[in-house]
């Protein structure tokens, strides 16, 4: 582990304990903020806390990705093929994200103690999977747009708008891709209009795996455009 990643682990652990102390209902936060058995609400503080759960992605891993893409011309020559470099970079990003959210899950277990439930365990799985999905989605947008600032803003906006659209009944959770990190919107909890955990898992895994097409064909052309001289074209 390099020093930057160790710092990311420390930040993730500190963030988890901070949320555990400040959230009015930590279980509800992990399952999707603003939800009660009587109503579903859209509250600013709750949304901010939900977005903070994904800070290890859009404030740590994405900027690691940006740094590696901007300095790619220094590293690619170490690998005989650009494909090998990309597989190493993307694999590292995914692995680091998994480790960060395993650390988060470990902290949650400590915070919840004997109150740890199956709902929290499933919620942690959905949060982790959604975090990796957000990573993959963001990397795609970064490669297409060439601008990580746009990516960071877009991810935050999409997560927020998705929650708002469901709360205002303009979209059902089953069709709200950026709400699939919330256990409260699963069919088991929300009802028929909730999303299927199995379907959500499969679709998000497809998006996560889709970045592997960058090793050949037009995908490789897109990748080479972004790393040919370490600058955005």
Image: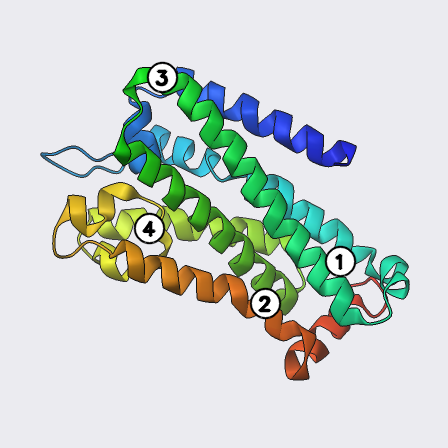
Circle 3 SS class = helix
| Residue 209 vertical position relative to residue 148 in the rendered view, above or below | below
Q: Mark 4 points at which residue?
A: 179
Residue tagged 2: 211
Mark nearest the camera among 1 and 2 is 2
Q: Which label lies toward us, 3 or 4?
A: 3
Q: Which of 60 and 80 is in front in this view?
A: 80
State the residue position of label 1: 69
Quadrant of the image occupied by residue 150: bottom right
3D distance between C-alphas at marks 4 and 2: 22 Å
Looking at the picture, how far across and down is residue 22, in whole percent? 40, 17
> Element type at marker 2?
helix
Residue corresponding to mark 3: 113
How far is disc 3 from disc 1 in space, using C-alphas?
41 Å
Contact check, label 2 and label 3, Cβ < 8 Å: no
The residue at 69%/29% (across/down) is 7
> Tags 3 and 4 in contact by the CB under 8 Å rule?
no
In three-dimensional space, the C-alpha distance between marks 2 and 3, rounded to whole angstroms, equals: 38 Å
Q: Is residue 25 visible?
A: yes
């Amino acid at each position: 582990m390099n020093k930057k990643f160790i710092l990311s682990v420390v930040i993730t652990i500190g963030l988890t304990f901070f949320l555990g102390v400040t959230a009015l209902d930590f279980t509800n936060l992990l399952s999707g903020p603003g939800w009660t058995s009587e109503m579903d609400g859209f509250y600013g503080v709750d949304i901010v806390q939900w977005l903070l759960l994904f800070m290890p992605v859009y404030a740590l891993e994405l900027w690691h990705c940006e740094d590696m893409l901007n300095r790619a011309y220094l590293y690619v020559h170490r690998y005989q093929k650009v494909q090998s470099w990309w597989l190493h970079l993307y694999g590292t990003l995914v692995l680091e994200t998994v480790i960060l959210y395993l650390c988060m899950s470990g902290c949650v277990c400590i915070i919840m103690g004997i109150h740890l439930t199956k709902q929290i365990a499933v919620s942690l799985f959905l949060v982790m999977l959604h975090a990796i999905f957000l990573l993959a989605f963001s990397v795609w947008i970064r490669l297409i747009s060439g601008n990580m600032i746009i990516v960071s803003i877009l991810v935050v906006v999409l997560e927020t708008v998705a929650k708002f659209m469901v709360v205002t009944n303009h979209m059902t959770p089953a069709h709200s891709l950026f709400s699939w990190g919330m256990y409260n919107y699963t069919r088991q909890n929300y009802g028929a209009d909730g999303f299927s955990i199995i379907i959500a898992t499969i679709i998000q895994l497809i998006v996560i795996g889709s970045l592997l097409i960058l090793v050949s064909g037009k995908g490789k052309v897109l990748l080479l455009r972004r790393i040919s001289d370490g600058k955005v074209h």
